[in-house]
Image (tube, rainbow, N blue to C red):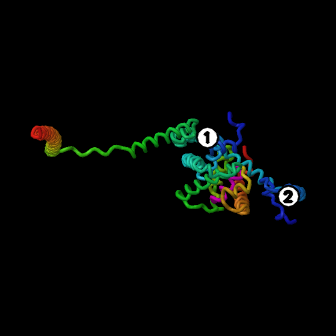
Amino acid sequence: MNCSQYDVKGYFLNETSPDERTAIEAHLEVCGRCREELARLKALRVVLAALPEEEPPRRLAFVSDRVFEPSPWARFWNSTPRLAFASAALLAIAIVAHGWIARPPAPAPAPDLAAIRAQLQAELSQDLQAAVEKAVAEATARQERRTAELLQAAERRYQQQRLADRIAFEEAFEVLQKRMNVYRASLAFGSAQ
Amino acid sequence: MIFRDVEDPDLIQGAQRGKVEAYNVLVSRWEKRVFNYLLRLVGDREDAMDLSQEVFLKAYMNLKRLEDRNRFAPWLFRIAHNEAYSHLRRKRPQTEWDPQAAEAAPLSRTAPLETALAVRKALELLPEEQKEAVVLKIYEGFKFEEIAEILSCPVSTVKSRLYTALDNLKQTLAPIDARGVE
């Protein structure tokens, strides 16, 4: 009898198809050697089962332990207010960026007081001199304008006076000529009589 | 158990989304099996404990890569297998099956404790790959396909290793088998 075509170990390990099982069971009914093989395998399983499962000597580090715990950031990120946090974070970043971009110039290093004083004095002296010069120039210009105005006014008065005198002279001369004409006419009339 | 009604795939999905409590339950469900698998491979409780810790840490770190949540067990034991073999490579070279050593194994007594010791000894005498096939099939109850996935080898190789291991164990444990287990 050819027993090699029957997978008795597979049958024992429950790794055969239903058709194979049927064929093997039929074979076992007629084959004493294969029945003995199956009996040895079943006995072996009983012996192997004598090796008990053992409890671990201590509990494993569960996920509740620190080694498995997600980071505080991951826990927070998975929490409900993460959107609010994200919005606040964006706003904070915008504020910081704006502050950085529009920041005031960095402060100068520690000042040299004597140099600053000398520089200030020099600048003050220059400013003072410029202010005086400017004031003098303005006063001079103002005075020149005033003088010119006075001269112009005097000139106008002089021309007006001349004109008035000439008119008065011409009027007086005209009166005189009239009187002389009257006198000549009276002379002529007297001599004619 | 409080979470027994929740299936593993649901817990895995929760853990993949960052729910640490879900992974916590997964660990509590699988730690004993993983520990015993490793213990039977490496033979030392403290080593098995440390390796179990590593296995669950690596599983947690890589859980998002697990696409088929129904294949969690083979995936987890694949990690355990890698950890065990890294450990064994550091500690000692692979053992070869030695029939003389098997015959010389002290199996004269069959009280339960001695039987357990005899079985442990018989397993230790097997080459690593045969022993692992026995542990995954007989003790952990995986199917051939799952074992092939864990060991990253063809199913035919799994069958070959397992059948050879059973023959070797029958030979080594024959005295106990003949007397029966008390």
- Distance CA(mark 1)–CA(mark 2): 45 Å
Q: Position of residue B99 (x, y in %)?
A: 66, 62
Q: Is residue A170 visible?
A: yes
Which residue bears the numbered disc 2? A20
Q: Is residue A98 magenta?
A: no
Q: Quadrant of residue A190?
A: top left
Residue furthest to the bottom in view is: A2
The chain letter for the residue carrying disc 2 is A
Q: Which mark is residue B19?
A: 1
By secondary structure, the bulk of the magenta-drawn segment is best described as helix
Q: Quadrant of residue A96?
A: top left
Q: Which residues are magenta?
A: B127-140
Q: Quadrant of residue A166?
A: top left
Q: Position of residue B58 (x, y in %)?
A: 57, 50
Name the secondary structure under disc 2: helix
Mark 2: few/some/many CA within 10 Å (<14, 14-19, 20+): some
Q: Amino acid at mark 2?
A: Glu
